[in-house]
Amino acid sequence: MTSSVLFSTPVHWCKCSVDEQEALITRPAVNASESVSAIVSYILKQVYQQGDNALRTLNARFDGTETPQLRITTEAISHTASRLSPPIKQAMAVAMANIDRFHRAQQLPEVDVETFPGVRCRQVTRPIASIGLYIPGGSAPLPSTVLMLSTPARIAGCKRIILCSPPPIADEILYAAQLCGIKEIYQVGGAQAIAAMGFGTESIAKVDKIFGPGNAWVTEAKRQISQRLDGTAIDMLAGPSELLIIADSKANPAFIAADLLSQAEHGPDSQVILLTPDAQIAQQVSKETDKQLQTLSRAAIARKALANSRLIIADDLAECIAICNRYGPEHLIIQTRDAQRWVEQINNAGSIFLGDWSPESAGDYASGTNHVLPTYGYTYTNSSLGLADFQKRMTVQQLSPHGLIALAPTIEILAQTEQLTAHKNAVTLRVTALKKQPMSIRHLARKNVLALKPYQSARWLGGKGNIWLNANEYPLPPTYTLRGGNLNRYPTCQPERVINGYAAYAGVQPEQVLVSRGADESIELLIRAFCNPNKDAILFFPPTYGMYSINAEIFGIERRTVQTRPNWQLDLPTIDTHLKDVKLVYICSPNNPTGNIIHPNDIRQLLDMTQGRSLLVADEAYIDFFPNASLASWLSEYPHLVILRTLSKAFALAGLRCGFTLANSEVIQLLLKVITPYPLALPVVDIAEQALSNEGLKQTRKRVAEINANRDVLAQGLTKCPCVCEVFPSVSNYLLVRFDPKYQVFKNMWDQGTILRDQSKQPGLSDCLRITIGTSAECQSIITTLKALNIPSHSSTQEAL
């Protein structure tokens, strides 16, 4: 019955026998598989034995083309662009961009897992070094296949990419190859092209893996060559085009017919199938197909394909899904009212297109998904082509001594069970050796802490000198007298007089103030209170203060950065794209180490962007030197604003370790839950109270005026030093200066007892040093010393290095 069924005649699935149902969804090319296999075996043998001569003979026999030179010259490739119209070239560029975007998104992060304490396992990927792309010729050029294959190969990093296509190769294929950067192109097609890439010939070096669709002969050649010990890997067994459409009663018959014909016109061995529970839709599609067929340039080819195609009426959509999974189509279009609902039930398909507005042609050319798909029912086990096909995976494992000792019994028992004594001995010998060594406690530490590079504070870096200008401290000690106290008693967690004094100084309410061990502790408290490890992130903007990053790393919080613009202002458009899952956004204003104020309008925009999403933390450690830029008055307007302050800078109390957090009371109450019970020692409380008294504040304002004046004098003097390239404007108690590297300023000043801070490793700060503003005499000493510096000789330079 079914052998004589025409495409124009709908068939009721339930009225067919089991054998008839099987025949309805049998692919036509399968019937000729035995003859195809024999011919392909002969072709592979000829190429294997005769190399290039066989390729030329087979080109003449099957493609009717003489090919004395198999490789297309670079000059010939370059000339194709001039022979193509701008629209086709633009279309290729747009399609390639979408394909690039989709496949680049498939890049997987490295897998790095501790499977057992002390046992680290990783999975890494590497590109396949050499790949061969087969581009079918047939009755029309397929430049889209060039884009689909070469784009993921390029993203994967494959070093050698060659292309084979039947002669003569169309300009469209050559231009697409040129667009993708392919320079090694051979005019050879069919099974002989697969053999050439799989075995290698005098002209064509063997590749590691072959990619590309083709007819039954190409597919069979790939199958045979992949099964030989001296053969080559392949991507998949892809053959003639297939399309299956599932349509409901409200589907558009014209759309369905157009989609069916879009695959039928690929070749006479293509197959298209409509599955629908609606007999009327099937009849309408039959008529619409015949109508559209009359207008096609490849109508004769499509008509032959339709002879192997079917209109099938099922009982309902569920039965349509079942038949579809049984067939396993290359392309599947679901034109139903709730197409997304059925996707979860599809198990076997190459590429799926949902709804009335998703023609299969979009996937063939420009949506971005790959159109190289498994056919012949190989969708049961194979996937659509993707980036992973051009890569290979490797696993890496490393056991610590503790990890090996802990895991050893498991390994030894399993090895003993399998009677593999040498396997067991490989472990036992190591464990015996380890037990003779002293134990290390490093295996008990957190992995992120072991890898942590600690903050390099000014004192940590050391140095021996008499002028210390590397920590942004006030150069002279203030005079305070300890007023005693009961040191046998714990202090108050939040001393009231200190809180009230700083609230009055900052112009906020006492309930908006928290006091801590420097502003550094506040950075940590905010992370502890608001960020979930391995889930949330913080965001900050280099070059800036390093403790934001260090604290996040300690607590296992993702660190995101957006580098500031060349003028060290915020890059707001880029910041907006990085805010997902960010709980804390840190800005430093005045910024350390650049010394500039962040534009207030930019901060307002950032506050609007983070409303309801993140806390914006403004580090104002240096605001006392430029108080007009303080954000303290904004707290009532922005409940998610947090401000950090300190007594270390203008108050000349760096050794006291006393800082403040200014925020709305809800934030303060949360921080009180995670702060230590007694953050400030009684002597700290005593001196902080004095510093915040009227007399203490008077002295602070005097120091600020002095430092600001010294800064201006130093900045002016530095501009006259030959070794200085640029002095950056600053409103703080330091200057950032870019020096001519040949003067080796940092080392020379260090050797002479003047300690500066090297900032050259920060983004955008090459050859930059930060100079703390000292006394008037220290500033003059800096200028005098720098003016006297000479360019080191070659020999002294080598010694310095």
Image (cartoon, rainbow, N blue to C red):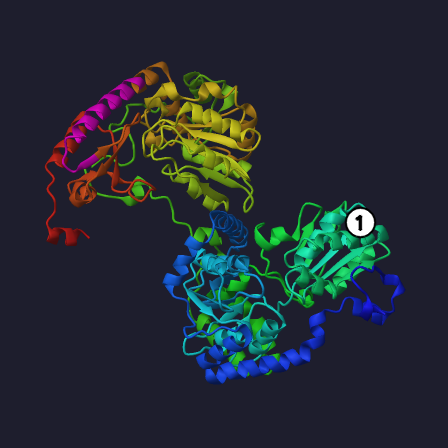
Please tell me which residue lies in front, 440 or 608.
Answer: 608
Overall secondary structure of the magenta section: helix
How many numbered discs?
A: 1
Query: Which stretch did the figure color magenta?
Result: 701-725
Q: Position of residue 692 (x, y in %)?
A: 38, 19
Q: Quadrant of residue 186?
A: bottom left
The residue lying furthest to the top in this view is 694
**Disc 1 secondary structure class:** loop
State the residue at coordinates (12%, 39%).
789
Location of mark 1 (residue):
248
Residue drawn at 76 percent across, 64 percent down: 326
Regarding residue 493, the answer to whether it shows in the image is no
Does 80 sit left or right of 478 as displayed?
right
Q: Residue furthest bottom?
A: 49
x, y percentage for residue 387?
53, 59
Q: Is residue 724 magenta?
A: yes
Q: Is residue 14 left or right of residue 567?
A: right
Q: Quadrant of residue 75?
A: bottom left
Task: In the rendered view, tell whether residue 510 sits above or below residue 163.
Answer: above
What residue sits 76% from the left and 51% below the top? Answer: 288
Q: Position of residue 729 (x, y in %)?
A: 27, 28
Please name whichever residue, 271 or 228, is drawn nearer the observer in this view of the structure. 271
